[in-house]
Image: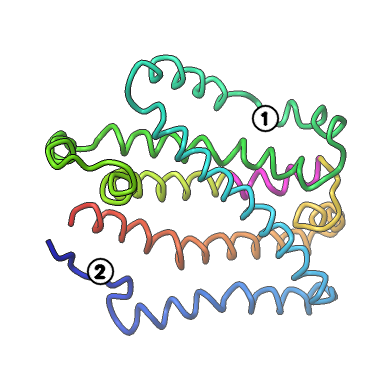
């Protein structure tokens, strides 16, 4: 069956508004640097450093969450692993952060490890939910045609797990951005948004504009990347 093409940009105005959202965070950062008398290099370094840490944690989270969800979404392991993962999800991560800092030191590994522990659970449980909601007719078709190996992954597992992956990513990264700043402050790592907010914590104006810029950045990423992907994923599965 030939798949219909799905266009992310439904109109010319949609395309123009997306371009504006792409430029919005950069324009705001330039304005903010001038307002706060900060060097642009310093500001962009802090933003990009935090972004790279979050990106690395997200990549690890997606890989682990997808592998675990495929491994235990069905069968006897489900009754053991899902409650266990649910308990781990409820574990107060920040309570153990000072201990981890003492053991592993002030390092990127400490920050990324705790970001993974924050991001992974929404992704994991969303993918499990997607896999559990798979139509019985689809599973029967896979069995009848004897689809296995790479074809099973490409034509069945991957498509049906995409909506859960994207939904979980939106939730997980929302929690990840929040945990990122707090973790960087607690660990005391140089560079990053946590270091920025801690440095200027006594300056109310810079802190307010910094939070506003932070929200603009998150909103723009969701608008540019995740909302179109979420809509595309539902269309992809329906086809």
Q: What residue is shown at x 56% (from left), y 60% (from top)?
A: 218
Q: Earlier in the sequence, mark 2 or mark 1?
A: 2
- Element class at badge 1: helix
Q: What residue is pinned by disc 2?
A: 6
On-image quarter of the N terminus:
bottom left
- Element class at badge 2: loop
Disc ID at residue 68:
none
Q: What residue is shown at x 75% (from left), y 26% (from top)?
A: 96
Left of 148 or right of it: where is 47? Answer: right
- Residue 134 lies, with reference to residue 233, above or below; the image says above
Dividing the picture into quadrants, the one containing residue 107 is: top right
How packed mark 1 is, by other alpha carbons closer than 10 Å (few <14, some 14-19, many 20 or more), is some
Dividing the picture into quadrants, the one containing residue 55 is: bottom right
How packed mark 2 is, by other alpha carbons closer than 10 Å (few <14, some 14-19, many 20 or more), is few
- Residue 19 lies, with reference to residue 73, above or below; the image says below
Query: Within the magenta stretch, is there residue 234?
Result: no
Q: Which contiguous range is marked in magenta?
A: 176-186
Mark 2 vs mark 1, foreground winner is 2
Query: Within the magenta stretch, is there residue 185?
Result: yes
Q: Position of residue 135 (x, y in %)?
A: 17, 37
Q: What residue is pinned by disc 1?
A: 93
């Amino acid at each position: 069956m030939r798949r219909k093409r799905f266009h992310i940009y439904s109109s010319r105005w949609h395309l123009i508004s997306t371009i504006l959202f792409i430029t919005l965070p950069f324009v705001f950062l330039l304005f903010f640097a001038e307002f706060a008398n900060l060097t642009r290099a310093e500001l962009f370094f802090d933003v990009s450093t935090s972004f790279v840490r979050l990106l690395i944690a997200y990549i690890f989270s997606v890989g682990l969450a997808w592998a675990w969800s495929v491994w235990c979404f069905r069968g006897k392991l489900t009754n053991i692993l899902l409650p266990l993962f649910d308990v781990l999800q409820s574990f107060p991560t920040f309570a153990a952060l000072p201990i981890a800092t003492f053991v592993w030191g002030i390092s990127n590994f400490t920050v990324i490890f705790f970001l993974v522990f924050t991001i992974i659970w929404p992704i994991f449980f969303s993918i499990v939910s997607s896999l559990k909601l798979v139509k019985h007719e689809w599973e029967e078709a896979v069995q009848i045609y004897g689809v296995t190996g790479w074809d099973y992954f490409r034509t069945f597992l991957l498509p049906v797990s995409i909506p859960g992956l994207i939904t979980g990513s939106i939730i997980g990264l929302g929690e990840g951005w929040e945990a990122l700043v707090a973790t960087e402050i607690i660990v005391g790592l140089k560079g990053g948004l946590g270091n920025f907010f801690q440095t200027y914590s006594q300056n109310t104006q810079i802190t307010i504009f910094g939070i506003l810029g932070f929200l603009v950045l998150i909103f723009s990423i969701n608008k540019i990347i995740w909302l179109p992907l979420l809509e595309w994923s539902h269309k992809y599965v329906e086809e």
